[in-house]
Image: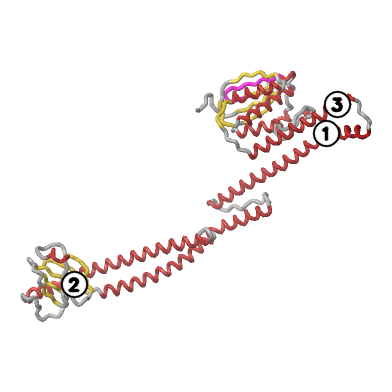
C-alpha cells in the first residue's frame, strides 16, 4: 500500500469499505428473504386442505400401510412401530420425527427428501395417540426464487462496488485537493527558499490548521535566518576593528624589522601590549559568539538546581577578576542549565563592575528575584530599550573593553530557563539588573 499515492489508497479504502458494506447488506437481505419464504411455506403446510389430507389418510390406510386411491398432497403417517402410510411420494422418516409419536407437542420443522429424492420442507406433528403425521411441500419453487434473488442481489452489489469506486475517487479528489495545494506551496518554498510567501489558508478544518502551522514554522524559520544573517553581519562588523588594528600593529613591527629601523623600546612595548589586548578582545568576542550560537542549537537537559549556589559560584569567579562583590542570598531552586545561568550571572556582575567605582557590586536574591546593582553613573533613559541587543553599546561604554554581547547572552540564558530580565536605574544612583526566575524555596527531590 505504501507504494501507492495517498489518493489511490484513499480511493481503494473507500471502495473496499463500501463494497464490504454492500456485500453484507446483500447477504443479510438474502437470508431475510429466505427465512420469510420458509416461514410462509411452513404456514401453508398446515392449512385446512392439508388437514383434510391427513384425516382422509388416517381413515383409509390399511394395516399393511398401503394407501387407498387418492391423488393429492405429500403426507405420511407414522406409528410407534415405524409403520408408515403415505399420500403421494413417501417422506423419508428420520430420528427427528419420532418425538411427535407418543403425545401432542410443538410441531417439528425440518428439511428432508421423499423416497424418490425430491427435496421437501417437512412438518411433523402428533395426529392421534401413538401416531404422528409428516406433511411436506416441495422446495423447488423456493429454491428457484432464492436463486433468482441471489443473482439479483449479486448484480446490485456489483453495481454498488462500481459506484463505490467512482464515489471513492471523487471523494479522494475532493478531500485531497487542499492537500495538493498545500504540497505545491511547500514544494515552491523548498525550491525557491522564498520564506516571504505565505501558504493560503481556507476554512477552519484540519488542512487549514496544518497550513497555519506551516505558516508559523515558515515565519519562525524566516526570523531565525534573519537573526543569523544579522548576527553574521554584526560579527563581521565587530571583528573588522580589532583585526584592522592587529594588522596595522603587526605591519609596523614587521616593517621595523625588515628595514632595520628599530622602534623605540617604549613604542614597541606599547604596540605589543596593544596587540595582546586586541587578541584578548578577539578571544572574548569569539567566545561570546559561540555562546550565542550554541544557545540557538544546543538544547542541554535542564535539571533542578539551587540558584543561590549558581550565584555564589559566579561571584567567586568575579572576585578572582578583581570585582568587589557583596552578596545577600536566600535559597531558591529553579530548573535550568547551571553553566548557562552561571555565565549569565557572571556577565551581569562583570558589566556592573565595569561601571562601578572600584568595581563595587551588590548582589541579592529574594524569592526568585536576583538583583545585581552597581554604583556607577546609570543608564540614559533612551538607551534602556537597547541594552539587551546584540553588539549594542551605549556611547559611554564604547571606549570600555567588551564585545557588546554580554547582556544579549544574559537575556538568552534567562529566557531558556523560563525567566525575565530587565535593566533599570536604581534609586540613589547606579543601575540595577533584575532577573526573575520561576522556582521554589525548597527542592522537589
Q: Main secondary structure of the magenta part?
A: strand
Badge 1 marks a residue whose secondary structure is helix
Q: Which mark is residue 136?
A: 2
User: What's the residue at 43%, 69% (across, down)?
Assistant: 159
Would you name the residue on which mark 3 appears?
A: 270
Residue 218 image offset from top left, x and y in percent: 63, 47
Residue 287 image offset from top left, x and y in percent: 71, 33
Q: Is residue 199 left or right of residue 112?
A: right
Residue 368 lies in quadrant: top right
Q: Which mark is residue 291?
A: none
Q: Earlier in the sequence, mark 1 or mark 2?
A: 2
**Label 3 with label 1: CB-CB less than 8 Å:** no
Q: Residues within 10 Å of mark 3 (few under 14, many from 20)?
A: few
Badge 2 marks a residue whose secondary structure is strand
355 part of magenta stretch: no
Badge 3 marks a residue whose secondary structure is helix
Q: Earlier in the sequence, mark 3 or mark 1?
A: 1
Q: Which stretch is magenta? A: 360-370
Name the residue nearer the viewer: 333 or 395: 333
Q: What is the spatial separation of the Cα atoms under label 3 and label 2, in whole angstroms?
A: 129 Å
Name the residue nearer the viewer: 163 or 5: 5
Name the residue nearer the viewer: 381 or 163: 163
Residue 410 image offset from top left, x and y in percent: 66, 31
Q: Residues within 10 Å of mark 1 (few under 14, many from 20)?
A: many
**Label 1 with label 2: CB-CB less than 8 Å:** no
Name the residue nearer the viewer: 222 or 110: 110
Q: Is residue 59 left or right of residue 97?
A: left
User: What's the residue at 33%, 64% (across, down)?
Assistant: 28
Would you name the residue on which mark 1 appears?
A: 246
Amino acid at each position: 500500500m505504501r507504494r501507492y499515492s495517498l489518493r489511490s489508497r484513499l480511493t481503494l479504502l473507500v471502495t473496499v469499505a463500501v463494497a464490504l458494506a454492500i456485500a453484507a447488506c446483500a447477504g443479510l437481505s438474502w437470508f431475510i428473504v429466505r427465512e420469510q419464504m420458509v416461514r410462509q411455506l411452513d404456514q401453508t403446510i398446515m392449512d385446512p386442505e392439508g388437514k383434510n389430507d391427513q384425516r382422509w389418510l388416517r381413515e383409509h390406510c390399511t394395516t399393511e400401510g398401503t394407501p387407498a386411491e387418492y391423488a393429492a398432497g405429500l403426507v405420511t403417517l407414522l406409528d410407534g412401530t415405524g409403520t408408515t402410510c403415505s399420500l403421494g411420494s413417501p417422506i423419508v422418516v428420520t430420528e427427528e420425527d419420532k418425538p411427535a409419536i407418543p403425545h401432542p407437542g410443538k410441531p417439528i420443522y425440518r428439511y428432508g427428501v421423499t423416497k424418490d429424492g425430491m427435496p421437501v420442507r417437512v412438518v411433523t406433528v402428533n395426529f392421534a395417540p401413538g401416531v404422528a403425521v409428516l406433511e411436506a411441500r416441495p422446495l423447488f419453487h423456493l429454491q428457484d426464487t432464492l436463486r433468482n434473488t441471489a443473482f439479483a442481489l449479486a448484480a446490485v452489489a456489483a453495481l454498488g462496488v462500481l459506484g463505490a469506486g467512482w464515489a471513492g475517487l471523487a471523494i479522494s479528489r475532493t478531500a485531497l485537493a487542499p492537500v495538493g495545494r498545500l504540497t505545491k506551496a511547500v514544494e515552491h518554498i523548498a525550491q525557491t527558499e522564498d520564506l516571504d510567501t505565505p501558504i493560503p489558508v481556507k476554512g477552519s478544518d484540519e488542512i487549514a490548521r496544518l497550513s497555519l502551522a506551516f505558516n508559523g514554522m515558515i515565519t519562525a524559520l524566516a526570523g531565525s535566518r534573519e537573526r543569523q544573517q544579522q548576527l553574521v553581519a554584526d560579527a563581521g562588523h565587530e571583528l573588522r576593528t580589532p583585526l584592522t588594528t592587529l594588522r596595522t600593529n603587526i605591519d609596523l613591527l614587521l616593517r621595523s624589522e625588515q628595514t632595520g629601523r628599530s622602534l623605540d623600546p617604549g613604542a614597541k612595548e606599547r604596540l605589543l601590549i596593544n596587540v595582546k589586548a586586541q587578541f584578548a578582545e578577539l578571544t572574548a568576542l569569539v567566545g561570546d559568539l559561540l555562546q550565542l550560537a550554541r544557545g540557538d542549537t544546543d538544547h542541554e537537559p535542564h535539571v533542578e538546581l539551587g540558584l543561590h549556589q549558581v550565584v555564589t559560584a559566579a561571584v567567586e569567579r568575579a572576585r578572582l577578576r578583581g570585582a568587589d562583590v557583596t552578596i545577600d542570598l536566600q535559597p531558591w531552586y529553579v530548573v535550568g542549565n547551571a553553566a548557562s545561568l552561571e555565565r549569565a550571572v557572571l556577565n551581569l556582575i562583570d558589566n556592573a563592575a565595569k561601571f562601578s567605582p572600584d568595581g563595587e557590586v551588590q548582589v541579592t536574591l529574594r524569592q526568585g528575584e536576583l538583583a545585581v546593582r552597581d554604583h556607577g553613573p546609570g543608564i540614559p533613559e533612551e538607551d534602556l530599550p537597547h541594552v539587551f541587543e546584540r553588539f549594542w553599546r551605549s556611547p559611554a561604554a564604547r571606549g570600555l573593553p567588551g564585545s557588546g554581547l554580554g547582556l544579549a547572552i544574559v537575556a538568552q540564558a534567562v529566557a531558556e530557563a523560563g525567566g525575565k530580565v530587565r535593566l533599570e536605574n536604581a534609586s540613589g544612583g547606579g543601575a540595577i539588573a533584575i532577573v526573575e526566575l520561576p522556582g521554589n524555596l525548597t527542592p522537589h527531590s
